[in-house]
Image: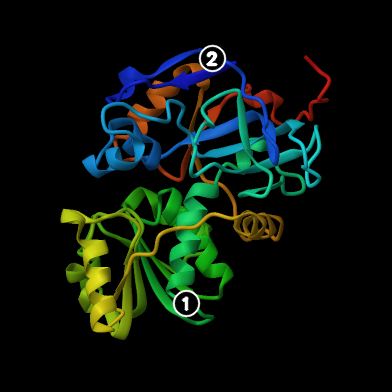
Amino acid sequence: MKAAVNTRYGSPDVLEVRQVPKPQPNAGEVLIRVHATTVGRTDCGMLRAHPFIVRFFAGLRRPKRTILGMDFAGEVEAVGTGVTSFKPGDRVFGMSPDDFGAHAEYLCVSASGPIAALPAGARFDEVVVCEGAWYADTYLRELRLQPASRILIYGASGAIGTAAVQLAKSYGAEVTAVVATRHLGLVKSLGADRAVDYTARDFAEIGETFDFVLDAVGKTTFFHCRRLLRPGGVFAGTDLGPWCQNPLLAIWSSLTRSKRVVFPLPKSSGARVDFLRARIEAGEFRAVVDRRYPLEAIADAYRYVETGQKTGIVVIDVIPAAEHTQPRSPEAP
């Protein structure tokens, strides 16, 4: 099978699309023929091993995982022994947060993991949204978002941000989205009650307060946003933040019991993907696709994501997009 392989850390130039052995499902696993995947900030961070602490988990000298890619959508090709929840030909989507591997024509994942049937009527390239939604919903749940809660989402145009706007609205919250000028219309179309242009003014000076502030891109700080929080309000950042302060502040907040800053570690599960599937089918969540690339041009996708300018997700069409709506028989070559 073809896969994008990186045997060393570095820039997108180290990626090589080449033939590698096709995986076989172990007991409890399903083999998926991948139709679509994405390139996100996590992939870029793993490729460069940045920050350096990544190497303590991914391999000190060279990467343990040589095929990246977390989001996937495709068809079940085969199942391992003991699998009864899926069968060959099933159209599925989900994520592989521990082993990655979705930047390839085939991928094995646990049948009990974060995988679910494709939402009714959806195309493969419309549902490779689990990573952004996974992060967003983890934080929204940690914040204990309630109907009528007021939340400000900074960086609301990325994969996490667009997911956070939509999921916050599905919880009944009042959402203020902070974005650049060109994204004002986008976040309004996703349900934001108000859109603030951070290029026109300092968003922290809008003269309002909120129950929660969510930094979806890791580019602001609790100290800059403190004036936006009501008494008892909570700040959350989905990245380490400048000088890796978010986890440190979260620890301090826990020790002092102030609960002013939270930094939860996302946990994936099949239930989380089922939840997202239900939101998609209810019309409460949709993918925002910035660009798409064939697998052969995946290095260009990485270069674009590294600019920090992407909107929503960047899709990799492992199988040409024209085939996404065509179910494939498991016996087909």
The three-letter amino acid code for the residue at tag 1 is Arg
Q: Relative to the observer, which residue lies in front, 48 or 99?
A: 99
* Res 185 visible: no
The answer to which of marks 2 and 1 sits earlier in the sequence is: 2
Residue 177: which quarter of the image? bottom left
Residue 144 bears which disc, if any? Answer: 1
Q: Residues within 10 Å of mark 1 (few under 14, many from 20)?
A: few
Residue pictured at 37% horizontal, 41% vertical: 41
**Left or right of 271, for residue 188:** left
Q: Residues within 10 Å of mark 2 (few under 14, many from 20)?
A: few
The number of numbered discs placed on residues in the rendered structure image is 2
Q: x and y percent of residue 232 in the render?
A: 31, 86
Q: x and y percent of residue 285 in the render?
A: 60, 56
Q: Where the C terminus falls, by quadrant?
A: top right
Q: Is residue 273 above or below residue 292?
A: below
Q: Relative to the observer, which residue lies in front, 204 or 4?
A: 4
Residue 122 bears which disc, if any? Answer: none
**Left or right of 314, for residue 259:** left
> Mark 2 highlights which residue?
20
Residue 298: which quarter of the image? top left
Q: Is residue 162 above or below residue 70?
A: below
* Res 39 visible: yes
Q: CA distance from mark 2 to mark 1?
A: 44 Å
Q: x and y percent of residue 319 in the render?
A: 63, 23
**Left or right of 163, for residue 184:** left
User: Of helix, strand and loop, which one carries label 2?
Assistant: loop
Residue pictured at 70% horizontal, 61% vertical: 282
Q: x and y percent of residue 62 in the render?
A: 31, 26
Residue pictured at 40% horizontal, 73% vertical: 151
Q: Mark 2 and 1 residues: CB-CB less than 8 Å, in contact? A: no
